[in-house]
Image: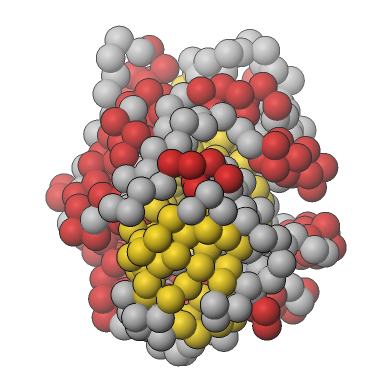
Amino acid sequence: MSKKAKILVTLGPSVKKKNILRKLILSGVDGFRINFSHSILDIKNTISQIRFIENNLKKNISVVADLQGVKFRIGKINNNKVLIKKNSQLIFDLKKKSGNENRVCLPYPDVFKKIKLRNKILIDDGKFAFKIKKISKKTITAIAQNDCVINSFKSIHISDLETSNDLLTAKDKSDLAIAKKLGCNWVALSYVKNEKIIKQARALINKDMGIISKIENKLALKNLKKIIKDSDAIMIARGDLAVEIGQDEVPNIQLDIIKKCSLLGKPTIVATQMLESMIENNKPTRAEVNDIATAIFQGADAVMLSAETAIGKFPIQSVTTMRKTILSTERYKKEHVTNFKSSTNINNDPVRAIALAIKDIAYNIKVKAIIAFSVSGNTAKLVSAIRPSSRIISISPNINISRQLSLLWGVTSINNSDAKNWKDMMKISKKVIQEKKLTKLGGYAIITAGLPFGKSKMTNMIRLYQLK
């Protein structure tokens, strides 16, 4: 049994070598995330290695460019790390030199204009808290509320501090240009507040790149429906979200977002601290395993690892743990299928009606596979969203679309020349069925696509095919 939910992992110092990258893919990785908030030195070489392994293993791999957005970060720290004791004083200032146990750089002049004594400073997804004692035009003096180990460029959150920026930063635009040159298949937008930044990014990326909107603040939750509609996928970034709304609210919000995305046929990625303990340990906690299983039970398309692979000591073990948990959970879901029915609203949409018809045919005739011919990827996305029990094979002439689709639930993506007519479609389908050993002679597969060939703007064809 192969897993249907996908695994996205973050690139970093721990996973730069070709043999490690290969082992990660063989262990179940479907996509790699580039975190543009950190150094991307030598990232071009890493992507080249991934593409070499991809070609060698004949498995399409997604690459996601995760932009920094308007997220605040402290500057560089001497020796990359500093220990600050509880009740110690720390100064945040605008000086661009490396920080130490007495001061760190906070390179945002607007923060110094807006911040108040009542605000709290939280570092590293809220792990470390500081109470503000004194504010001047160029310094903020604060007291550590717990023992802290702070690294260079760690994220910083200031409670109840509103920022007006809802568009791409200059750094984001520059990083988008780099992402295009690297051949990234997705771009993840950080700190999305509304649909404005999505539309701005859409105008700057290639047509065969997808947009993932990260939900990590209160304004995003307020504008959630519009953000989901305008995005190609949603990431639930639980670290910053927890800082914004409180840890106890995150499980409810996670379930609500996955349900809303399911109704609108949009994929979801659950992220942040899924196997946090495995940064240092080779085995997970029971709570972490349960966290992964919960995301799969709820219907997430993918789950993501961050520091566990980027800087962790056990990246391969982390991926293996995630894969085993996914397989175990999906096995249970298959055995209790009536308890986990997916729901997609038709809302007078003929394309969604066709997708649900595909699901019904596949279930009632016990079809072994659904083959989706998809130039743009829309047909495959539609089939994935309805969660059929049959295997989904997407065929696209665009390699970047094939790579993008590899991050979607249940999809095995194949890059192949597009069908020019019915005869060509049947020939390609038969070849795929035989190569992938999808069904025996006499077995059924559903073939779906948009007509006319190569020009359709919607999925409008279903054909039941019997291998003879």
Q: Is residue 54 above or below residue 83?
A: above
Please provide percent x and percent y for residue 61: 66, 54
Residue 432 horizontal side relative to residue 380, left or right: right
Observer-nearest of 463 and 214: 214
Which residue of the protein is positioned furthest toward the left in this rendering? Answer: 339
Can residue 318 be seen from the camera position used here?
Answer: yes
Task: State the residue at coordinates (46%, 24%).
Answer: 195
The mark total stands at 0
Task: State the residue at coordinates (60%, 78%).
Answer: 100
Observer-nearest of 179 and 360: 179
Q: Is residue 405 above or below residue 307?
A: above
Task: State the residue at coordinates (38%, 12%).
Answer: 350
Quarter occupied by the N terminus: bottom left
Task: State the residue at coordinates (26%, 50%).
Answer: 245
Please provide percent x and percent y for residue 244: 31, 50
Residue 148 horizontal side relative to residue 329, left or right: right
